[in-house]
Image (cartoon, helix red, strand yellow):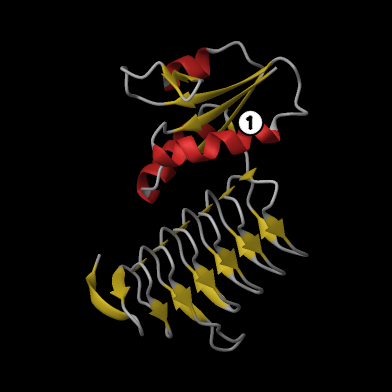
Amino acid sequence: MKIYGIVGAGGFGREVIPMVKKMMINSVVNSELVFIDDNDNLKIVNGYRVISKEEFFSSNFEKKLFNIAIGNSQIREKIANEFISGGAKPFTITHDNTVILDNSNIEDSSILCPFVTITSNAKIGKFFHANTYSYVAHDCVIGDYVTFGPSVKCNGGVIIEDHAYIGAGAVIKQGTPKRPVIIGQGAIIGMGSVVTKSVPSGFTVFGNPAKPSGKR
């Protein structure tokens, strides 16, 4: 008996939960898929029951699995720590057309949306969000709680540190083993930007080529 909980019944959660439903087709009969949300006014969203965190943990299911469909990476980390401490286990969400090639190491907690590609020898940390049509190319290292908007192009030899946010349509140029392009912790890459060099931790950059607009 398993319960699968998607934390957050907002827009991204509503996009993610049908992917989980499809993944569960061959699952055991006694399983349930729900939203977990602290909005007491929500009872049913898109046909799925909405329950509180307390209801999730007090349920009679033997295995409690979860993922977090919330964009704010700091909140995502706080919720993840709370749920794992409570005995719940994260699981990876993928669409059936997500492509993952050889020898990539992905922590079991990512959300990989339709048409996402992870190529060879990538390393991806905890609770990574990759929105539609994004890709991570060979030899990239992605930290924990990193977020990709739709159509992000992360080319080979790139290091992205924890809590970085890469906006929709951004392109990060390829690095080399000796000189990787590094996106620092908590950095923000603006929508449609073309990143040609490393970005310091906490900085926001945008444009083509991307230039700093200030520190986060």
Give how far across and how far down residue 144 sits, in percent: 50, 56
For the N terminus, which image quadrant? top right
Q: Is residue 172 visible?
A: yes
Give how far across and how far down residue 120 sits, in percent: 72, 69
Number of numbered discs present? 1
* Towards the viewer: 137 or 127: 137
Q: Residue at x 43, y 73 (%)?
A: 183
Q: Residue at x 67, y 53 (%)?
A: 98
Q: Classify 193 as above or below 40.
A: below
Give how far across and how far down residue 163 sits, in percent: 41, 58
For the C terminus, which image quadrant? bottom left
Q: Is residue 81 visible?
A: no
Mark 1, secondary structure of its residue: helix
Q: Residue furthest top?
A: 60
Q: Is residue 51 left or right of residue 116?
A: left
Q: Quadrant of residue 188?
A: bottom left
* Towards the viewer: 197 or 144: 197
Q: Residue furthest left?
A: 214
Q: Classify 203 as above or below 16.
A: below
Give how far across and how far down residue 186 sits, in percent: 36, 63
Residue at image mark 1:
21
* Towards the viewer: 9 or 81: 9
Q: Classify 112 as above or below 36.
A: below
Q: Is residue 185 left or right of residue 134?
A: left
Q: Residue at x 51, y 54 (%)?
A: 131
The residue carrying pointer 1 sits among few (fewer than 14), some (14 to 19) or many (20 or more) residues within 10 Å by Cα, namely some
Q: Residue at x 36, y 43 (%)?
A: 75
Q: Give the amino acid at mark 1.
A: Lys
Q: Classify 142 as above or below 31.
A: below
Q: Is residue 63 left or right of residue 172?
A: right
Q: Quadrant of residue 176?
A: bottom right
